[in-house]
Image (spheres, helix red, strand yellow):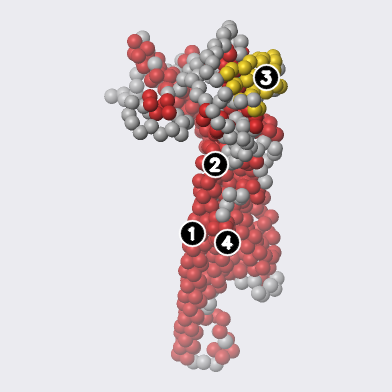
Amino acid sequence: MDSKPEGTEEVDADIIADLPGDGTEETEVEKKQRLAKEKKEALKEWGGTASFGRLLSLATWTDLLILVLGILGAIASGAGQPMMCLMFGDLIDGLGATMFTNFDMAAMSNMTAAEQTAAIEALTAEAQAVMLQNVGETAINFILIGCGVCVAASLQGWGFAYFADSQVKKMRPLYFDLMLHRDVGWFDTHSPGALPGEMMADLEALHEAFGTKLGVSVMSFSGLVIGLTVGFILSWQIALLMLATLPLMAGGAVIMSSAVLDFVQEAQGPYEKAATLADEMLFAIRTVVAFGGEAREIRRYSAAVESASRGGLRNRIKTGVGMGYIWFVYFAAMALAFWFASKLMYDGQEDLTSGKVMAAFTCVLTVGFMVGNIAPGFANIAVAKASMARFFYLVNHESTIQKRLRDDREVIGPIETLQLDEVHFAYPARPDIKVLHGLSLTIQKGQKVAVVGESGSGKSTIMALLERFYDPLEGAVRVNGKDLRNINIQSYRKQIGYVGQEPVLFATSVRENILQGSSMQFVGRY
Ligand SMILES: Nc1ncnc2c1ncn2[C@@H]1O[C@H](COP(=O)(O)OP(=O)(O)O)[C@@H](O)[C@H]1O
Ligand SMILES: [Mg+2]
């Protein structure tokens, strides 16, 4: 039986044309450019990227010590690969111990056949013993390196992850605190809906910058430096030759990574589209069922999924070709290196052993593969410096009205008079449209005042100014004759109650809702 859902066989052109957002939405490249431009403009507001020191400014000495341990671990574990290559060379030389080393042709020629056999057997046994001892020593060295790398890699993994976690953990509540203490006007120009997501993304960038990826970068960098040094000490000619082949391999890596990137981007769009479709259908499931539209909806969904898999194939092939090319260069380099090494050895470089050749060769090649790991981790730091710019701007720039740390302004008691004095006002989001033009008004204690006017005339604006959500552009709001700007904001807010046009009820009792913000404690129940 055919298990395919009905109607998935043919995909009509009209169905493909019907997929949401086709053709009109921005491409990935356009999106990236737009985001980069937005980021750049935002950075101007936050006074440029945060310095590296700032990123570390919440770290305690313990945090820093753990980071340093992580860095030392990364440096040591970076040395692991070159050390292994070195041991590999030792192993080859160790295995190469043969009876021929001590073979004395002249002495042999004077012996009887039986004596010759005995002498050869003795030499063979001696060579075997030497070989076993060599290999045994090398094996122990391998184990020691293994233990060292085990400790180093653990330190690396723990140090970087701990540091990143502890910084973000400290910054998360602080970031929220900073946001909560912005003035109301600030939220007019910074869309509050987007803020939680942006805060999360900023902290995520910081986490990426100091997390395990940085560890890998440090490790790779250390591996590269140590590997090249060891390679050049062993045989500078072989090391130089291998270094020359690395760019050829890098070409393959570039093809591969671009294919992977393209693949992710190409697949993302259509899958997102498919997800949107599924959302739409399930949300309107009653309508779909009522019109018997299931078959058509399944066709649309299949078409969206189909277009995702088509994009993938070309890039999968590219990935394969890139991989194949890298291995080809790898083997070709091996051929070149060994040919060149044998030439060197025959040309009288007696200190060059096959072990050294192998070690120099593998050293340079393995660290060559690490080069690609270095940049991403360090690039993340640059990203974090940009992302955290707003955070540190907010740390440095207290709000005018709300005070987060200390409010030294005069504390106020019960209100006797409220007064608007020649108040001019425009909202921060629309600075060129004036809402109040020199309004004056005095309200005495005990008075009931109604402000009447047509919609949009500025009634709510007066309330917002009396609440000191905003400050007037000119003139002043006075309480008991004192300019509201000089009054401790919390003490003032305690004296006033405010029910807005669209009141917000918190998820608690009515009583608790009424008592919000009040320091009064009522014992009884009402
Ligand atoms: N947060 C805001 N940002 C920009 N303009 C605003 C904002 N709130 C109100 N306005 C504008 O200010 C004017 C006065 O609004 P408002 O005081 O709410 O009027 P009312 O309460 O009398 O209906 C209106 O034109 C309104 O569009
Ligand atoms: Mg209103």
Q: Nearer the viewer, mark 1 or mark 2?
A: 2
* 472 relative to 15 in the view: left or right: right
Q: Which mark is residue 174?
A: 2
Classify the position of the C terminus by image quarter: top left
282 or 5, nearer to the observer: 282
**Mark nearer the N terminus (4 vs 1):** 4
Callout 4: 10 Å neighbours few (<14), some, many (20+)? many
- Residue 178 occupies which quadrant of the picture? top right
Q: Nearer the viewer, mark 2 or mark 4?
A: 2
Asked if residue 16 shows in the view, the reply is no
Q: CA distance from mark 4 to mark 1?
A: 11 Å
The residue indicated by pointer 4 is 72
**Mark nearer the N terminus (2 vs 4):** 4
Callout 1: 10 Å neighbours few (<14), some, many (20+)? some
* 348 relative to 118 in the view: left or right: right
The residue indicated by pointer 1 is 154
Q: Quadrant of ligand 1?
A: top right
Q: CA distance from mark 1 to mark 2?
A: 30 Å
Residue extending farthest left? 1
Find out whether the residues at labels 1 and 2 contact each other: C-beta distance under 8 Å. no
Q: Secondary structure at mark 3?
A: strand
Please state the horizontal and vertical placement of residue 329, each as a whole percent of the image.
61, 51
Q: Secondary structure at mark 2?
A: helix
Q: Which mark is residue 421?
A: 3
**Mark nearer the N terminus (3 vs 4):** 4
* 43 relative to 154 in the view: left or right: right
